[in-house]
Image (cartoon, rainbow, N blue to C red):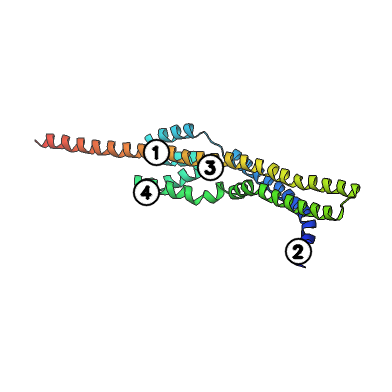
Amino acid sequence: MLVQKLLSIAQVGGQAVLYVLLVLSVLSIGVIIDRWWYFRKRRIDAAAVGRKLVELLRKDDVDGARKLLKALPGVEAAVLDEALSWYPDGEEAVAEVLASGVKERRAQYESGLIFLGTLGNNAPFVGLFGTVLGIVTAFRELAGAAGNTAGMNNVMSGIAEALVATAIGILVALPAVIAYNIFQKKTQDLQENVETIGALVLAQMKSHRDGFKTKAANGKRGAARVEA
């Protein structure tokens, strides 16, 4: 009784799996286009931005540096702008804001990557499941088509159609895996850009602080000599 019900489900299950894979492929394409457009709109030249920031900070033009960052579309610019708002509080505060800013925005720049990674890893198994269901149905027809040439042809055709599910599963998985790897690299580049530019900003802050201390010490020495 139970076996018969399962066999009946298997007859429609193979086609249902193909529809599921079709829906997943459409969703995958949608996510890929969305992520491509997201990173394209927020692309910046990190090296050029870092050099410009250092030039402005050397002139103590923090407002100019923040204005420059606000005009840029990248996630890196938003994180650095937030960090520079803590500029008067010193290097440690800026460094902590840089680290937390990247983490806070992770949901934005990693959106959809879990779906692509999961789909890339599991779509072939979904297709294989559809193939198994199709083959079960084909063998059931084979049992009732013994000695019938037309029936045997239908069985072979059913097996061929069942194998299509595995092929479609692989076809759906490949773009998802490729896109996942590409966008994962872009997120790593984004984080590295923040770290690189942030290191330049912190180095400039340290240099500015040390230079201020040196000037103060020289001033005290000069005053002492005058008094002597």
For mark 3, does the 10 Å Cα neighbourhood hold few (<14), some (14 to 19), or many (20 or more) residues?
some
Q: Earlier in the sequence, mark 1 or mark 2?
A: 2
Q: Residue placed farthest to the left in the image?
A: 228
Q: Of helix, strand and loop, which one carries label 3?
A: helix
Q: Residue at x 52, y 49 (%)?
A: 106
**Residue 27: where, in percent of width, then height?**
69, 49
- Which is closer to the viewer, label 2 or label 3? 2
Could you say which disc has been placed on residue 199 in the image? 1
- Disc 1 versus disc 3: nearer the observer: 3
Q: Quadrant of the N terminus?
A: bottom right
Residue 10, labelled with which disc?
A: none
Q: Quick check: marks 1 and 2 in contact, CB under 8 Å? A: no
Q: Which residue is mark 4?
A: 93
Sequence-wise first label, 4 or 3: 4
Mark 2 neighbour density, 10 Å: few (under 14) some (14–19) many (20 or more): few
**Could you tell me if the residues under marks 1 and 4 are in contact, i.e. CB atoms within 8 Å?**
no
**Amino acid, disc 3:** Thr
- What amino acid is at disc 4? Ala
Q: Are marks 2 and 4 in contact (CB under 8 Å)?
A: no
C-alpha separation, residue under disc 2 versus residue under disc 4? 67 Å
> From mark 1 to mark 4, how far is it between C-alphas?
13 Å
Task: Classify mark 4: residues with Cα within 10 Å, few (<14), some (14-19) or many (20+).
Answer: some
Res 219 quadrant in image: top left
Per the image, the residue denoted by label 3 is 187
For the residues labelled 2 and 3, the Cα–Cα distance comes to 49 Å
* Mark toward the viewer: 1 or 2: 2
Say left or right for 180 vs 29: left
